[in-house]
Amino acid sequence: MAVSSTLAFSDSIIQGRQFCENLRLGSYGLSSSNNLKLKGREPRWNFCSMNSELMLARLRFGTESSRKFPILSSLTPNITGEVASPLEQRVYDVVLKRANLVKEHQKSDGLEMKLDIVLPGTQQMLNEAYNRCGEVCAEYAKTFYLGTKLMTPERRKAIWAIYVWCRRTDELVDGHNASHITSTALDKWESRLEDIFSNRSYDMLDAALSDTVLKFHVDIQPFKDMIEGMRMDLVKSRYKNFDELYLYCYYVAGTVGLMSVPVMGIAPNSHATTESVYGASLALGIANQLTNILRDVGEDARRGRIYLPQDELAQAGLSDEDVFEGRVTDRWRNFMKNQIERARKYFEDAEKGVTELNQASRWPVWASLVLYRQILDEIEANDYNNFTKRAYVPKCKKLIALPVAYTRALIR
Ligand SMILES: CC(C)=CCC/C(C)=C/CC/C(C)=C/CC/C(C)=C/COP(=O)(O)OP(=O)(O)O
């Protein structure tokens, strides 16, 4: 099983690699220019920093998500006149749009899922494609895969297809061929994505995603935004403040939450607003990514990257050199405590949304939430040495977490 799924995924990576290679060589009719300036890109880089009081408040309370976005329910200025920063506002606009789209579709067809008439033969090919997506998911995200087994077959297959696309996208910048990847390659990946959404596929894994996005009315924007995150990763190795980091986390992980909600489905008896459920899914993506960043500080530093807010490092009396040297000092411990607190707040925001999902979708989400959050406990247990020690959740703790997650999934 492991071998065949590795092979299955290797195939897809090889196809992806071939695709990258073709892009590099310009054989898709594009020049292989390395020019990183992208059409329409500039406005995205117009990062606005927060005012210093707001930043201090953030540091004191750990996170702004619950304070400024009480599950993102309102963006009106609060009594002190604070509003979300333009970056967060922009991310939230995406959340609102996604939620409205879902509402419109629910009104128009009364179903979350569109049922299509499929030509004979196509269904068999699609089943094979979905099975391959399942194999990839089983190989690379074992626990999550296990959880998806509890979902309805249609939803489970759709989640696999989305997972595989995200994995392939990530492989472009993180995989073996990463050093060859240019923004032009990402432009081509994006136009391939547009083809997928217009029901034109390059390979069977694309075909599975095409089928999924049509059936579940999944919108293209979060997928495009994820590619934007990869573009960001190509050119950026420092983040001035949490605002910048937040946008990066949205691009590479918050988007996964937004892609998944239409498939996971909101419980029919839920009284929560669609926006709040999307907000929670975004929060889970952000929480996961922040945790991932905190776990991988040492590994990233060895690649010359620091995914930590530079201004907060400076306020803690730390510099890039401290991170590169990897000394665990009291300053570092204090800095880490604040970062962990912030990540936990995002997990808390996410929790409120999990209970609103369809019953069968809750377990995998709870399981991944509980397990990923435990990485933060392990960083603490390692006395904040995330330079040379990798925080991981031991198997026994994972095994305990699964029934806990299952029980939580039963409760509304
Ligand atoms: C909460 C609600 C309402 C819905 C849930 C919506 C979902 C599924 C959100 C999850 C988003 C998610 C899984 C984001 C990816 C985050 C992340 C950091 C993934 C890390 O992936 P790998 O790099 O493979 O991880 P490891 O390095 O730990 O193996």
Image (tube, helix red, strand yellow):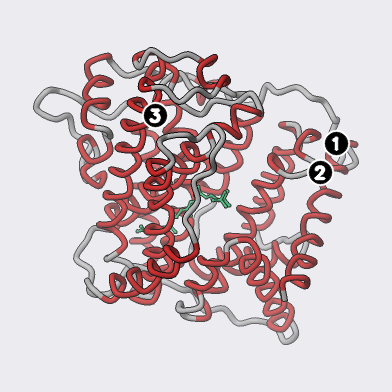
Name the residue furthest left: 79
Q: Position of residue 249 (x, y in %)?
A: 47, 38
Give residue 153's mark. none
Apparent side of residue 364 relative to residue 321 in the rendered image (left or right): left
Q: Position of residue 217 (x, y in %)?
A: 48, 63
Q: Position of residue 74 (x, y in %)?
A: 20, 41
Mark-to-mark CA distance, 2 and 3: 31 Å
Q: Amino acid at mark 1?
A: Arg
Which callout, 2 or 3, points at the residue further toward the start of the chain?
2
- Tell me whether circle 2 and circle 3 mark residues in contact (CB < 8 Å): no
Q: Which residue is mark 2?
A: 20
Task: Classify 10 Å Cα crowding around label 1: few (below 14), some (14-19), many (20 and above).
Answer: many
Q: Amino acid at mark 2?
A: Cys
* Location of residue 363 with respect to 56 vertically, above or below: below
Which callout, 3 or 1, points at the residue further toward the start of the chain?
1
Q: Residue at x 45, y 79 (%)?
A: 150
- Tell me whether circle 2 and circle 1 mark residues in contact (CB < 8 Å): yes
Q: Residue at x 31, y 31 (%)?
A: 338
